[in-house]
Image: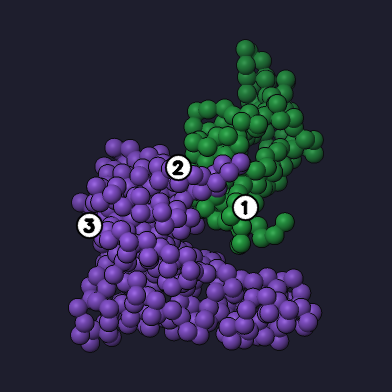
Amino acid sequence: MGFVMRVKLTETLRDGTLKNYFENGKKAGYQFDVRLAYYRGHYLSVIDEFAVEVDHEKVEDMDIRFCVNGKEFMPCELKEAYYEFWNIKKPATIKIRKEGGLTAGEHNVKLTLMIRNPYLPQPGAEDKYTPVDSCDEKVLVLQDTIA
Amino acid sequence: MNMSNIKLGVTTHSYVAEWVDDKATLEDMVRHIADLGCDGMEIVATSMFPEYPYVSDAYAGEIRRYAKDYGVKLVAVSGNMDRGKRYDRNLTEDEMLSIVIRDLQNANKLECPVLKSQFLISPRVMQRAAKYAEYYGVKLTIEIHNPETPTSKIMTDYYNAFEETGSSYLGFVPDFGMFADRPNKADMDRAIEGGANRDIVETAIQLRYDGVSREEGRKILAEKNAAPMEMNLFESMYGFMQFSKNPDFDGLRKIMKYSPHMHGKFIDILDDGTEATIPYDKILKVLDEENYDGYIVSEFEGQVKPGRSSFDYVRKHIALERKILEELNR
């Protein structure tokens, strides 16, 4: 790959946001927040690569929900989300289905998030756009308050 | 003395580091602009509009309050043309025109006289958009940004398209980065500190000054066994960090009648008060001679040094422009 833009102006994986969520009275999974590493917002359709690894294990696409603007998208639905705008100031919440949730304590979270800049074609190309790297990896701490 | 009416303002993009990191609000930016004695602000839609691509009544009210309470009004909306937002194809002309019409409507709602779009829009879409720009009373412009110049091929196509329509509602927003006449010394020093060979860096700069073609320059540097980082530096001199001993000031004079608004790009202000790469004294002299009547909005695109903020850089930039303008009008 040629030139890749990297513009990280704020934390991508957000500290203090890892928590379990419940469905029907049971821990159904966990979630954490993500901000885009760039200087403007983008339509979700410019996301070219999106994947999550937690504690060094890849999460299945079908278990992931990408949540913004009060809506929940499956990863395969992102590429056609031409009219869903992800504001640069708003976190997206990544929800991951996992019965029983995560244990309290530290978890390594690795986010792959590559987008293309839809207004910045690569030099000499008509339909290839400059990639932007919004990936991140860090340890997030889950403070489980509901046993 | 000339009859120019050069007004100074600031684009919200200058403060993007603090904005994205939740350290500054829109009102903080407005307050700073007012504090600098300026009355014009450009707003970047894709970064600032809370309901992009729409403008709510509440947001329009907020902008109106800033005009009333701080005396800072919107002088341009900066839009993006996301031609590549679909994975399977580029947007069609109709789809791009639709984006432009919505942006014009937004600018009108915000009582803003200029909409800046981007060159991907195409000259034909600009022509088709002219009647909507006229209807909304908003001038539709495209930015001329490095590596383009006022008379490069694409911009000449736009110029001819504007002439053909005869509309006074189409135009250009020149970005001063394209008039850079020297490389950014700080970047070069950083590269050399980071291991780049001084001789190769200086050769690369000289190749650029001499107007040697990109392909020819690559060959010459390859023969000198330039490392990838040195090659990248060379490539940047032909892209977004372009510079030339003879900036296209004649081109600037030519397009002036189509320029209601300009971007005062800056990367750094040196200790002596000058910009690191862009000859502001020469640019402002041209604008003054051509009787420019419009805004220059300060657009900071450099790295904020530790312990400082974007706000400090904007203040210095406005001071630099004021000093030159005072000398010109003496």
Q: Position of residue B227 (x, y in %)?
A: 76, 74
SS at circle 1: loop
Q: Nearer the viewer, residue B183 or B143?
A: B143
Instruction: Give the distance between the C-alpha atoms of the residues marked 1 and 3, in whole angstroms.
Output: 43 Å
Occupied quadrant, residue B325 = bottom left
Q: Badge 3 sits on which subunit?
A: B
| Lower sequence index among marks 2 and 3 | 3
Lateral position of residue B238 relative to residue B249, left or right: right
Residue at point 70%, 60% (across, down): A2
Q: Residue at x 41, y 57 (%)?
A: B123
Q: Residues within 10 Å of mark 2 (few under 14, many from 20)?
A: few
Query: Which subunit holds the residue at mark 1?
Result: A
Near mark 1 (Cα within 10 A), the count class, few <14, some 14-19 or many ≥20, is: some
Q: Which residue is mark 3?
A: B71
Q: Residues within 10 Å of mark 3 (few under 14, many from 20)?
A: some
Residue B6 at x, y = what percent?
A: 26, 72
Q: Residue at x 74, y 32 (%)?
A: A59
Eye-nearest disc, 2 or 3: 2
Q: Residue at x 62, y 52 (%)?
A: A128
Q: Callout 2, which amino acid?
A: Glu
Q: Position of residue B122 (x, y in %)?
A: 45, 55
Q: Colour of chain A?
A: green
Residue placed furthest toward the top: A24
Q: Quadrant of the C terminus of chain B?
A: bottom left
Quadrant of the image occupied by residue B321: bottom left
Residue B227 is left or right of residue A16, and the answer is right
Q: In the rendered image of this protein, does residue B205 appear above or below residue A5?
A: below
Specify the quadrant of the image occupied by residue A52: top right
Which residue bears the numbered disc 2?
B95
